[in-house]
Image (cartoon, rainbow, N blue to C red):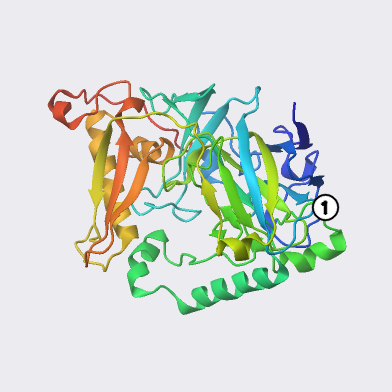
Amino acid sequence: MVETVFEVDTDEPPDEQPDPIVNRWHPDVPAVATVTPGESFRVECLDWTGNQVVNDDSANDIRDMRLDPNHHLSGPFEVEGAEPGDILVVDILDLGPFPDHEWGFTGIFEQDNGGGFLTDHFPNARKAIWDLEGVYTSSRHVPDVRFAGLSHPGILGTTPSHELLERWNERERALIERGPEDETAVNHETRGEDPPLALPPEPNEVLLGDMDESQVEEAAEEAARTIPPRENAGNCDIKNLSRGSRVYIPVFVDGAKLITGDLHFSQGDGEITFCGAIEMAGFVDLKVDLIKNGVERFGIDHAMFKPGNVEPQFSEYVVFEGYSVDEEGTQHYKNSTVAMRRACLDAIDYLTNFGYSREQAYILLSTVPVESRIAGIVDLPNTCVTVSVPQEVFEFDVDPDGLEDAPSEARGSVAEPS
């Protein structure tokens, strides 16, 4: 049995947890535990919303979500001997839901409260609950689908130094002041009247672990949001960072101060609905080691990883292609975001041939271990992006060769606000 170094309670609010939750990146947050290279340990995690979502058939909780306090994370953990310039090696040994909490959720957020990759097509809150049975999952809100999840921590990262934190804040504020560039404007405009290009420090509902109260107010003004990935890895949402994976992350402060959380039972590449994985509370078992002076030796500025050997085995896919031409017919120059949107929209419309609503299909693309690839990037003016949907996850035939015989009766519905 590995030692549990961080505990949570899914029946208590984030500010009343057995161990203190953190929801921002800041170098002065004290470590909650110390771990030794070569040591295995268990970390318990709340779901990313901090218990804001319940297992029911209403999407009120998604519609009314408080986003400022997210993510709710576990740590930081000091690694003995870690120094700036080292590489922290993290082995993901195991992870899963708590035995008394074997369910997860997926949400489509309101356009004016979070949105999502296709929020202009899906502006209203919706929710799906998933039952978790061993490695398999199914949902009463998206019937006739059952598949093995590719479980992973959405967030795994080291703590930035003061210098790196200042650099993050400066460059993200500069982006906000500069405004959307021509090739990103089409994506920016779909997020509402005045959508953010970045999320600067937000001192509202900040949780900085065991930091002394006298320091919290000042630190909250500069602590970085945990939403985007950065040089410290963080919220990469890489579905293949699953059991057996080994992750190499640059160290920026003494002790590395590792933080993790935002556990996903399964996710498709892109996590496109924003709350787009099968989000869950649960545990993750880790082991750490150090490569001294690893950043210079490897010549890297960002994290890297080796995938594990435990992944669902799919052999047949329906693959959708998208190019850098938006829905209005406007040509963009090698814009992979536009290409990804077009591939996803085609996949969604295709799945409606089998009785799914467009919202159900959107959720499926976000939760099933869908493979997305930049297939071609050199042939101007278009980038080609592919979205590959595994056929084996469906309990009926979705092959295009049999489309004429496909049953078109409605297959239930996702949860809506009441």
Query: Horizontal and vertical percent for residue 334?
Result: 28, 65
Q: Quadrant of residue 408?
A: top left
Instruction: Label 1, secondary structure: give it.
Output: loop
> In terms of depth relative to the viewer, which is nearer, 240 or 331?
240
Q: Is residue 294 visible?
A: yes
Query: Residue visible at 33% across and 26% down?
Result: 392
> In terms of depth relative to the viewer, which is nearer, 256 or 86?
86
Q: Quadrant of residue 54?
A: top right
User: Which residue in the rendered view is the most extreme toward the left?
Assistant: 404
Query: Residue visible at 15% across and 23% down?
Result: 405
> In terms of depth relative to the viewer, which is nearer, 333 or 347?
333
User: Which residue in the rendered view is the most extreme toward the front?
Assistant: 297
Q: Amino acid at mark 1?
A: Asp
Question: Is residue 335 shown above or below 317?
Answer: below
Query: Horizontal and vertical percent for residue 161?
Result: 71, 66
Query: Residue visible at 60% across and 67% down?
Result: 200
Indicate left or right for 166 with 311 as reference. right
Q: Give the residue at mark 1.
A: 210
The crowd level at tag 1 (other Cα within 10 Å; few <14, some 14-19, many 20+) is: some
Query: Horizontal and vertical percent for residue 21?
Result: 74, 47
| Quarter of the image that includes the N terminus | top right
Q: Is residue 66 visible?
A: no
Indicate left or right for 224 with 120 as reference. right
Indicate left or right for 181 with 69 as reference. left
Query: Horizontal and vertical percent for residue 194?
Result: 45, 67
Query: Residue visible at 36% across and 42% down?
Result: 371
Question: Is residue 284 shown above or below 207?
Answer: above
